[in-house]
Image: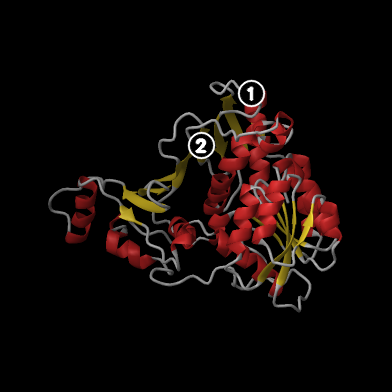
Amino acid sequence: MKKDRKEFVRRDFLKSSAIAGTGMALGLSAFPNIVKSYNQDIVRIGVVGTGGRGNWLIKQTQSSPDIKIVACCDLIPERLETGMSLADEKAKSYSDYRKLIEDKSIDALIIATPLSVHYEVAMAALDAGKHVFCEKTMTHNIEQTVNLSHKVKNSNLVFQMGFQQRMSPLFHRINEIISGGYIGDIQHIYASWNRNGDWRRAVKDPKMEKLINWRLYREYSGGLMAELCAHQIDVVNWMLDSKPVKVVGSGGVNYWKDGRETYDNVHTIFDYPNGTKATFTSLTTNSYEAFSVKFYGTKATLEIHRRDGQRAVIYPEPIQGANDSVDGVSSATKKVLEAGEGIPVVAEFESEDDAIPTSRSLADFAKCIIENKKPQADIVSGHNTAIAVHMGNQAMREQKTMEWGDKYDL
């Protein structure tokens, strides 16, 4: 039952969350058994794709005693060399992921390749009986999404998406706030992920252009929707406990005239089943607000931002008819509003790294394998976000409304 407006005040709000002032045992809740028995304490992982993201993931596994990186694979020698320097001292080196997958001593794969390769590597890994941690977005198109999702559902293997927010104490606190009705009914959401730069990396050899700058070419990438907006789409799907039903959008290559094919600005509006409209925007010519998600509720607005580290703040709506005679509790809220302040969302972090909890996500992946559990960023979240990303790109490219088809349901 939703609280009435007078109950929405600073002190009541901070007491209302069941996780206030507590550490969260994320990833170890009572999920149904979905994987075969695993009798080891160490998960032996091979990393496919040791570029910037892949090597960052390897670094994040170093804090987990349950993980050993025993193999690395990449087409670019210097990137592979870096990955090997971070892996176990006895790790094996590969330039062909199929050879890595053939190694029966490897339990699981981390896939951090260009987007266009996610599907083939994941399918091969599942065929070989290996668990998968896949970076976003899950696949390169809708058909691949449907095929891979059914493959995972029919397996007894752990498949985890790289949606780190699913493992964040802050985002779990936000989810409890929203689902508890504390900011009221949400009819509008606005998400932005803005940068000021060409998104291009230096290339020593022109022949390596598309291999290095794959994010700029449609053959390999889903562009800004897949690389940035995907995280926020997953957050909105999670907070609304839903998936979008249709989308319209606009985008283009309007500034960086450098031969790129993926858009340098994207603007999409998704409709959700209850009429909620969610706007996702990403720019490459202005970094104002950078990462931001605003949930506009009938009682308050909740904003998530990264201006000075990842934070969330609640801005209550003015109380209708409020005056100087309001009671002390309401007066406190009124003073906050008059000062232009917000109410910070408080979550307990074990360390500063938990603000973007990549290491927590990877530790959860290993725990799910060892303890026979379902990951929080599972195939359903990966599937629904991937479909939404592809719908958004198609809506922009074809300049028409794209609807969620029954065949997309998992």
Density class for disc 1 (Cα within 10 Å; few <14, some 14-19, many ≥20) is: few
- Residue 183 image position (x, y, % from top left): 39, 52
- Residue 187 image position (x, y, % from top left): 46, 42
Q: Evaluate whether residue 119 shows in this view.
A: yes
Toward the viewer: 187 or 366? 366
Residue located 45% across and 72% down the image:
23
- Residue 395 image position (x, y, % from top left): 64, 29
- As helix, strand or loop, the secondary structure at mark 2 comes to strand
Q: Amino acid at mark 2?
A: Thr
Q: Quadrant of residue 219?
A: top right
Residue located 77% across and 57% down the image:
93
Toward the viewer: 77 or 191? 77
Toward the viewer: 249 or 105? 105
In the image, taking residue 389 as reference, residue 318 lies left or right, namely left
Q: Is residue 185 above or below residue 402?
A: below
Mark identifier at residue 16 = none
Residue located 69% across and 66% down the image:
88
Density class for disc 2 (Cα within 10 Å; few <14, some 14-19, many ≥20) is: many
In the image, taking residue 12 as reference, residue 330 lies left or right, namely left
Q: Evaluate whether residue 176 shows in this view.
A: no
Q: Amino acid at mark 1?
A: Gln
User: Disc 2 marks which residue?
Assistant: 279
Whether pointer 2 and pointer 1 mark residues with C-beta atoms closer than 8 Å, the reply is no
- As helix, strand or loop, the secondary structure at mark 1 comes to loop
User: Disc 1 marks which residue?
Assistant: 399
Q: Is residue 96 above or below residue 7?
A: above
- Residue 71 image position (x, y, % from top left): 75, 61
In the image, taking residue 211 as reference, residue 250 lies left or right, namely left
Picture quarter with the N terminus: bottom left
